Image: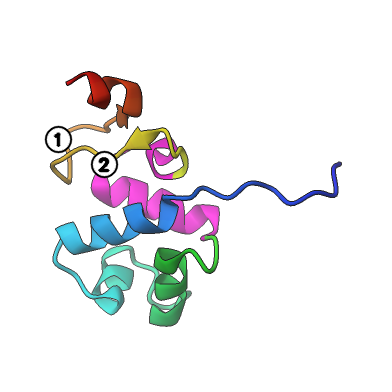
Amino acid sequence: MGKGKRARPRFLGRKMRVIRETFGLSQNEMLRRLQLEDEFSRSEISAYERGVREPPAKVLLRYSSVARVWVNVLIDDDLDLPSSLPTKAMHPGISHAKSKRS
């Protein structure tokens, strides 16, 4: 195993914030929507959104489920969230290459 730092997704926190704001929820309300209010705090959601901390897989999976986007859309900096959330079916995201052509 390497000892170097692992690259962190640059836009993960921003995507998490966009999802929360699209639903019109506060950070505490988002925790309730994710059914994680007993395990995580508002300050942790804030730290994830600001990119100070990286959320655990459980949190990412819940965001993915609520927004109906594949989890890789949250993690992959080359994919954007769809313009409308939640989507009708699980969405694979919008690649930057495709969005630049439009």
* Residue at the image position 25 percent from the left and 56 percent from the top: 18
- Inspect the image, locate mark 2, and give the three-letter code of the amino acid beneath it: Arg
Residue identified by numbered label 1: 88
SS under mark 1? loop
Magenta segment includes 98: no
Which amino acid type is shown beneath numbered disc 1? Lys
* x 51%, y 60%: residue: 55
Is 8 positioned to the left or the right of 19 in the image? right
* Label ID, residue 68: 2
Q: Position of residue 78 (x, y in %)?
A: 42, 33
Q: Which residues are magenta?
A: 55-74
Residue contact between numbered discs 2 and 1, judged by CB atoms under 8 Å: yes
How packed is label 2: few (under 14 Cα within 10 Å), some, or many (20 or more)?
A: some
Q: Earlier in the sequence, mark 2 or mark 1?
A: 2
Q: Is residue 51 above or below residue 47?
A: above
Question: Would you say 74 lies left or right of 18 here?
Answer: right
